[in-house]
Image (cartoon, grey):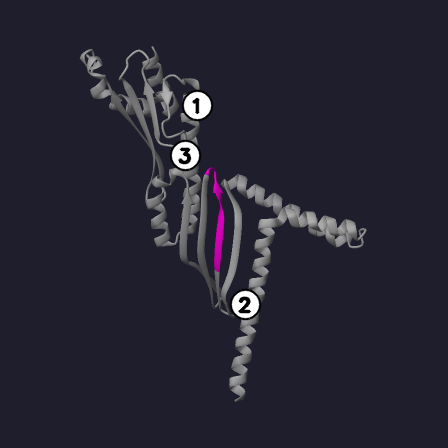
Amino acid sequence: MEQKYEEEIQMLQQEIEMLEAEQEETLRSIFIEHGDRLQHELKSVFEERGGAQKPALSKLITEVRELEKDLRRQTEINGIALNECFVKTLHKSERKLVQQLRLAGHCSVLLFQVEFAVTEIQEDDALRRRVTELNIVVDGVEFKDFSAFVSRVEDTKDLLLFFRTLRTFSERCEERRQTFQHFQEKYPDVVSLPEGCRSELMIIRSPQLPGTSMTIFWKIDVSMEGVVKPSLELLLKMSDQAREFDTKKVMENGSNYFQSLLQILGVEASIEGLIRTVCS
């Protein structure tokens, strides 16, 4: 009978520890999400009480500001901004800790939400930590170029690879957007973006030759290992009348010429060259 009571007491103690840890992590999540408002409330309390607790409150406000600065600094370094951070303890014992986490935020214009479980096991002097579950949601028109990679990351549970690749992929998407938008604004009568500046498609039409156009497809390929590489292709379209005068076989060799320009001049200079060709 005594052994049964001892086992029940031990189970209750473990449950209390789990609840305490969950409470601590819930408070941490609330702080991350509502830090600015909490700081404002702390100031209000201080003013109402006439500064009776000035030293402790001043120290707490300083710590809040330092944490905010550190968060902003991390965001500037890695380009990833978190809007939500939730942690829940599923199991806690002397040698094992299992936590469920949810992170939501954005990297450039890409919104993401990551849910994962982390298991920590203490073995002698070593602490083993691994991700045991992983679910990723990314929202944005660019996601179609990213979806296969995300599926593989969910299978391999490589969370670090996801965030590292997400940043690089977002940077390449932003470069494409800025380039497309730049040429549309500079040559509004020649350049059109039928699916918007965040898409992979840009059309260049000749004012002098109706029915003649050049379409640039700018894809951003992501390998299964997280290597991000831009891929540009050129599709030429000519009217039957223009084809009759195509003695230099521009229609036939245009795509190869464009690839050579990309290697020599780079993306912006190559596109600029194409646009000036149809404008001249």
Going by the numbered disc 2, the residue's amino acid type is Met
Q: Residue at x 61, y 45 (%)?
A: 68
Please name the residue shown 44% across and 23% down the image.
Answer: 182
Q: Element type at marker 3?
A: helix
Residue 260 screen position, x and y as percent:
29, 23
Instruction: Say which element carries label 1.
Output: helix
Amino acid bearing label 1: His
Which stretch appears magenta? 100-109
Q: Earlier in the sequence, mark 3 or mark 1?
A: 3
Secondary structure of the magenta portion, mostly?
strand
Say the numbered circle drawn on residue 18.
2
Residue labelled with disc 1: 182
Disc 2 to disc 3: CB gap under 8 Å: no
What amino acid is labelled 3 in the image?
Cys
Is residue 101 a member of the stretch shown in magenta?
A: yes
Q: CB under 8 Å between callouts 3 and 1?
A: no
Q: Earlier in the sequence, mark 2 or mark 3?
A: 2
Horizontal relation, residue 17 to residue 178: left or right: right
Decide if residue 97 is in sight here: yes
- Measure how far apart labels 2 and 3 are at the Cα level: 43 Å
> Does 244 appear above or below 8?
above
**In the picture shown, does residue 269 fall above or below 104?**
above
Q: Position of residue 225 (x, y in %)?
A: 34, 45
Q: Confirm whether residue 62 shows in the render.
A: no
Q: Quadrant of residue 164?
A: top left
Residue at image location 19% in from the left, 16% down from the top: 240
Per the image, the residue denoted by label 3 is 173
Nearer the observer, 144 or 56? 144
- Residues tagged 2 and 1 counted as in contact (Cβ below 8 A): no
* Residue 20: % across, % down: 58, 66
